[in-house]
Amino acid sequence: MIAYLTAIVTLVGVRALLTLGLNIQWGMTGLVNLGAVAFFAVGAYTSALLAVGGVSLLLAWPAGVALAAAGGAALAVVALRLREDYLAIVTLGFAEVLRLFLLNEAWLTRGANGVTAIPRPLHAWFGGHYHLFYLLLVLAAVGLVYAALERLRCSPFGRVLRAIREDEVVAAVAGKPVFRFKVQAFALGAGVAGLAGILFAHYLAYVEPNMFLPQESLYVWLALILGGSGSNRGALLGSLVLLGLLEGSRFAKDVIPFLSGVRLAAAQQILVGVALVTLMIRRPDGLLPEKPGSE
Amino acid sequence: MPPIAQYVFNGIVTGGILALPAVAFSLLWRLLRFPNFAVSTYLTVGAYAALVLNAGAHAPLPLAWVGALAATGGVALAVDRIAFRPMRDRRPFSLAIASIGVAFVLENVVRFVWGNDFRAYDVPVARAASVAGLRVGREQLAILGAAVVLMGLSQAFLRRTRLGVAMRATADNPLLAAVKGVPTDRVIAVATFGGGALAGGAGVFLGLDASIDPLMGGGLIISVFAAAILGGIGSAPGALAGAMIVGIVEEAGTLVVPPTYKTAIGFVIILAVLLVRPTGLAGSRS
Amino acid sequence: MTMTTRRGLMTRRQLLKGTAAAGLVGGAPAILLAQGKEPINIGTLCPLTGAGGSYGPDMQRSVVAVVERINKAGGIHGRPVQLFHEDDQTSAEAGVRAARKLIDVNKVVAIVATWASAVTLAVRPLCVEAQVFLIGVSGADAVTQGDHKGFVARTQPNTKLQGSMYAKFVVSKKEWKRVAYLALQTPYARSFGDAFSGIVKSAGVIITDDLIYEDKKPSYRSEVTRILATNPDLIMLEGYTPDSVVMAKDIYKAGYKGAILAPSFAVNAKFIEGAGPEVAEGIWNMDRAPLFDSPGYKEFSAAVPRNDTSPYAPQAWDQMSIVALALAAGKGEASGTVIKDHLRAVANPPGTAVYSFADGARLLAEGKKINYEGASGACDFDAIGDILSAPFAVQQVRKGKSELVTVINP
């Protein structure tokens, strides 16, 4: 039981990191990214391929984060000049094209086979207790990133981002190089997503393209909106609630025996969609909204 | 005939199918001020509505198609009433996200009832005829014909009828239109029903040309988006032209890139248009 | 011999009992029919939803049917078998969470009936680490490669073997000189294609095109246009039922008059129904030949009524039987290690041929050596857990039904 719960909490932690990354982009800066899963995948694959190729994790992990951040910057430079609803479709399309790339360019990414036997950090040291170690590693990462982002939120940089989110024009008039800040925020969010991907890949010791479907981006959104966009704490709560729902439905089939198989999965998805719509109508600020004026 | 001609023909048929939801998507965007991601799922709804009538109640396909138009229009109206009307004054982004949620729900309701299996209408499968070296399928011709007719009717509606003119006026300037006494709610209802019906009709075409499964409409969202943006949001002729171009480029593109990257072609088109000429081919001020 | 669809061979009473015992296709553990002692826990991890969703339920039911029989025969060393079912949703991550639950919460000693290669590959490290035995039908090469310490096996022939058998058939049909390879994007599409093409080419047949297509598309017109432009006599179509139906219809509509060869698990009764008899007419299909006349296959068919003839359900039946026999060959302790240590002893020759758990357990109790011959085939494993060579049955769809034409031997 302990190992099972450890595994679930580890995966919650990974999702929470990904949601924190999206929060930088959307919550703090107001940038619409419907392709959150893209940089998650970039971090995961970069580190996995390097590590499997013999590169030390001390190099592979930072490389993964760096490439994710760089990719985020590149996409931002191209796409951030667009209006909000255009940006949505561009980021969505980008994530899907990336997945197709991962699937088809097998010479680089191993294609549908995925990357197996990804080395895990310090595996030999911890032996039987490895899962606990990894859980602590992930929780530490979440904690550090959370603390850093809270700091960031209250910093001058964070204030500029908030000003941009509220009203770009005013921020520009006030002399801030709005575009540069947006790119930086986007890249930072992408880098955090990349870190989440790295922890994910090395935990499972396996990655394949179908782990990064477009609906995963939707789930991250749901987690963020559930918890309260703009709030880092909300990001954590939302991830916990979301994975709880997804994992909980595993036990639901014991309670609702007539719903099984496809029907159960479809019903679960319907609930996700209804939750999304209801949240947008009723509580667009989520369960734990950012309190105004909390610096 | 050089093989490229076959691709162009295939692309025209694809364009014909895409044109209907693209027009719906484009006009609704202009009218309601947000991109309605559920439009591509209306295709799925229409296809299954016709399936119920055709395979279930044994109606001939043309009749089932008409039924699908009505059913999908109705669904679109219901969706608007439930999900979008409470949000009329919100920012477009919130509505877009809500529409994604709606798309998710519709797709999975279909999946709940019919499962994931691919289905087909109760029509015999026919080999394509060879016309001037091109392979031309019977269904393809029917689709093109019906699409042309629908496009013509939509254009006539928008240009010639009072309600159509009112719709365009509301799209251009809702406040002014309201002041002038244009019944905004009625306009929105008609546009929503009409847009839903168009998309539903296209769904039947897609089901006829390819096959019916819960993911059928959702897979087209990027292409629909590309067609609408290329044509210029708010322009029906633009959306038609955009759909044709997207269809042809996607099909012919498989000569250059592997067919698996078809979605990527649509995406590249979107990006290129947005960066170079965001108002699209026919677009006025967005 | 005619392959007919099998419907309702169970009596109503058997069906009711089976349904009750299975707790439907859900999570309830099987009713314990053996008495008293501490149960042995086994997990099933099948795709009940997702891409593999059409195969999972039959596989799960097969395992349930075998366990019923095991418990009725007195269990393993007097201990009843208790099943725990999970849906992997044909997703690697969901599969890992489910496997974690089976291993840590339910304390299973084996996980059987996995299907998707991605799931098996993702779950493999967990099983090896926890010394839980893993056996499934996944085809990707990586499943049995690398260091799995003997805890992994599969009852599906690996792709090299499969590719070579298909190639052998194609070469034997002298009229096919130009072959196009058209495969669904799966982890084994490439290695199957390479194995197939290599052998076929060395016999002088030309591979005119090699195209891997994407899943879940409503139409494959552009792919078909490209393939047909190369003028093949035969299209080697390697996919699953849903995409194969769409592809076959598009090929037909495009006017192709040549031959198509596909796996039988794709061109099954559901395919014929979905594509229609005109489209399906003449399509060649082949697959590992089950031992049709064996008592094992007969018992399986009677116990698990189903509408299609995919090879996965009989394999799941065999997987559970072999795991149980390996445990029975041990001293009474139940663990993945015991299974690993005795797997080949009960499944491979030499030994008296047995076709069910009950027969095998009886002989084992008498100290005899056994060789399990299953519903899906001889089930003999090599050192890394792959199945040794097996004969393949070749069929052709004629007037709406697949008919056996010949058997290709290795």
Image: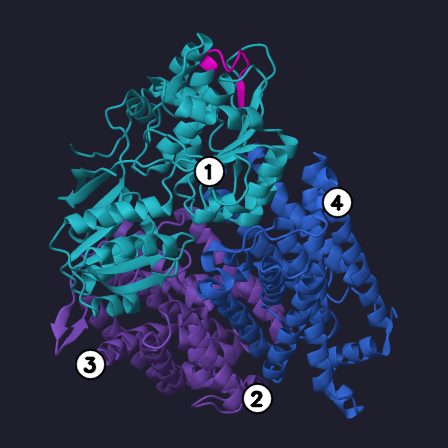
Chain colours: A blue, B purple, C cyan
Q: Going by the image, does C130 lie left or right of A175?
A: left
Mark number displayed over residue B2? 3
Amino acid identity at mark 3: Pro
Tell me residue A39's x, y (percent). Answer: 62, 67
The reply to whether discs 1 and 3 touch (Cβ–Cβ < 8 Å) is no
Given this view, does label 3 or label 2 mark the residue nearer the observer? 3
Q: Which residue is mark 2?
A: B176
Q: Quadrant of residue B257?
A: bottom left
Amino acid identity at mark 1: Ile
- Residue span colored magenta: C71-82
The CA span between labels 2 and 1 is 76 Å
Mark number displayed over residue A125? 4
- The residue depicted at 55 percent of the width and 87 percent of the height is B173
Q: Residues within 10 Å of mark 2 (few under 14, many from 20)?
A: few
The reply to whether discs 4 and 3 touch (Cβ–Cβ < 8 Å) is no
Q: Which residue is mark 1?
A: C384
Q: Are marks 1 and 3 on the same chain?
A: no
The image quadrant where one finds the C terminus of chain A is bottom right
Q: Secondary structure at mark 2?
A: helix
Amino acid identity at mark 4: Trp
Residue placed furthest toward the top: C366
The CA span between labels 2 and 4 is 72 Å
